[in-house]
Image (cartoon, helix red, strand yellow):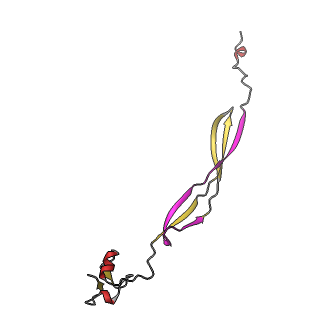
Amino acid sequence: MPADDFDSPGGADEKPTITKKTVVVKYKTVERKDPSLAAGKRKVTTKGRNGKRVDTYEDGVKVSSKVVTKPINRVVVVGTKKSKPKFVYYRNCSAARAAGAAPVYRGEPGYGRHLDRDGDGVGCE
């Protein structure tokens, strides 16, 4: 028998079936701390956008994958700035100690000259 009679099933002249599939590449959400933003506040600084990828298949088998459009991550800043009380008043050093604020230093919330006997800038020492 001639060698030509033993072709592989389907024949050698058949071309493979090529298919392409577009796939959405989801964006991620990234959080960053922001010390200038009040604690607990959240702010979107970059809006996210999905990307696209094209997968190529040959006879149902994936042979390549190419990102056509990169996803853009969504960026959210989270505030970490601690807010100070606007006004704090301690009637006496016992009240300051009970609040866990003693000693109270000049310039801090709650400091008052009535708490600083020797006038050195430190109350309830």
User: Image check: 40 left or right of 122?
Assistant: right
Image vertical order of residue 13 relative to residue 122, above or below: above
Q: In what quadrant of the picture does the N terminus appear?
A: top right
Quarter the C terminus occupies: bottom left
Q: Where residue 52 sits in the image (x, y, percent)?
A: 66, 50
Viewer-side residue, 22 vs 36: 36
User: Residue at the spot x=53%, y=65% of the render?
Assistant: 77
Residue 121 image point, x, y percent: 30, 87
Quarter of the image holding residue 82?
A: bottom left
Q: Write the residue at 30% across / 84% down.
A: 123
Question: Which span of residues is magenta-colored?
Answer: 17-45
**Magenta-colored segment: predominant secondary structure:** strand
Q: Is residue 66 magenta?
A: no
Image point (71%, 12%), residue name: 2
Toward which corner of the image does residue 3 lie, by quadrant?
top right
Q: Position of residue 57 (x, y in %)?
A: 67, 37
Say whether residue 34 is magenta: yes
- The spot of residue 11 in percent (x, y) is 73, 22
Nearer to the camera, 23 or 7? 23
| Residue positioned 62% across, 59% down in the render | 48
